[in-house]
Image (cartoon, rainbow, N blue to C red):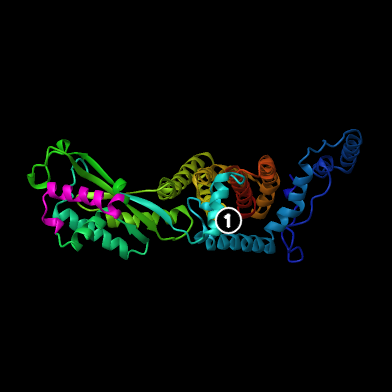
Amino acid sequence: DNTGRWRPLRRRQWWFCGRRPSGGAVSRLLDRIPGGTGGERSVRRRFIKGVKEVTKEPKPNPGSGFRTLMRNYVSRVLVSPMGLMVSFLIYGGLVAYAGLNLNRLVVGGSYETAGDYDSYFRDFFLTKLRDFPAASRVDTLIYTPKGDTQIAWHSPEVLADVRQIHEEMRESADVTLQVSPLMSFLRAMEKKGETPEKWTETEFTEELQRWIRTSNNGRLMARDFIWEAASDSGLAEGGTERTDQGLRLKSFRDTIIVSLVGSSSIEYAYQTERMREIVNHKTFEGRFVEFFLPWSDSTQVMLETTLTNMIISIGIMAFTVSFAVSPLAALVGMVAIASVDIVLIGLMPVFGIALDQVASVILVLASGFSIDYIAHVCHTSTEAAGPSRRHRVVETLTVMGSAVIFGASSSIVSVLPIMSFVTNKYMVNMAAYLLAMIFLVGVFHGVLIL
């Protein structure tokens, strides 16, 4: 309502855009009285002054002081050349710092993010990480047929595949040691001068069972073989009939001591994928079994799903804002939301937050939280009626910028109790800190950048 009283920006007023408006509503009304004869003008002035003496100014609401501060000082500093330069420097430095921290992001969690702070589970893993930092994990490798086929372990082709897998696993940097019961049996037979590839299935089964009963290594590895009834096995590869009595070898398991590559789940997932490529063959495939393997296997899918959902949410937001506000506001909102996501992901390593299942859900919601601030500011800016761009910016920050800051402040206050009092729950603490970061970064983009 004071746009007519603002003066253009001059060099002497480099820090501020015009002078500070003064006077209340009645005083401004006095200045807008149309001219006339001297007597009429005098009568009108006396009338307005009398009204001013008996009429009280409207009582200011709780946010009027903050809006006055935004109008008279903060907004005018921001639209000045120095204010714009400082704002862009802060924004550019924040984005650059976040980009440099992206490679430090822990995906899927690690030992340090496992369990609550006072749980036995977390204490166990932190003790393991502190006292045995170089300890490797132990996996079990079980060989299973592909589809409904059955594996003829006595055939030369299958035995050649087993030998090749064992050699490639020994040469792999991801494997420290592989203990294979079938390879132990084959090497024991080779030392006796036998050639297992020339045996029939019956001879192969009898020699394997004899080795399990009579040798020390065989007795130690007896539980690593899986047997099935020979009568249920059907035909071998090539149509060879199987025996109808006794047992036949169905599968077996190897013990793998995996090399230590890191403590995060995504590193375990990549390591497991490299080992799976080695053990998969035409007739059978190897399946790794380990306590944390399902957790690490889900990290790659979680990472891809999180990025996909964030892109979809930005697209839906842009489509909605283009109809509700304007296409220009939608374009600005897309750039701002993408910037918000980059800054959030880059700041997560600074606060020790890993990208796990809970964090991925909150990151997807970041688009919805942030667009609330940005859309309000964009809409108010398009509806502002100032004579210049600087005047419209000052009006936008005064009317809507203060409201957006109040909204973000109330949201941050709502998560402060969780951040302060619930200190022994990692997931709850992490969610509270991440929400507070979303509110701060979102209002920063909505008020300062736009």
Report if residue 218 lies within the magenta region.
Answer: yes
Question: Compared with residue 142, is residue 169 higher up or lower down, i.e. above or below?
Answer: below
- Up the image or down, 448 lies above or below 50; here it is below
Query: Residue furthest toward the front?
Result: 214
17 left or right, relative to 144: right
User: Toward the viewer: 108 or 52?
Assistant: 108
Residue 241 as seen in the image, left or right of residue 442: left
Residue at 54% in and 42% down: 368
Q: Tell whether 331 sits left or right of 68.
A: left
Q: What amino acid does circle 1 point to? A: Leu
Rendered residue at 27%/59% (across/down):
166
Q: Quadrant of residue 15?
A: bottom right
Quarter of the image for residue 249 reads top left
Give x and y (percent) for residue 387. 66, 51
Q: SS of the residue at dot 1?
A: helix
Q: Nearer the viewer, residue 56 or 266?
A: 266
- What are the residue bounds of the magenta stretch? 195-219
| Farthest-out residue, top | 54
> Can residue 144 be spotted in the picture?
no
Q: Is residue 429 visible?
A: yes
Q: Position of residue 2 (x, y in %)?
A: 75, 47
Q: Nearer the viewer, residue 2 or 444?
A: 444
Residue that numbered label 1 is attached to = 347
Rendering coords of residue 13 (x, y %): 76, 63
In this rendering, the answer to whether 417 lies above or below 335 is above
Q: In which quarter of the image is the N terminus?
A: top right
Circle 1 residues within 10 Å: few <14, some 14–19, many ≥20: many
- Say if the magenta span includes residue 226: no
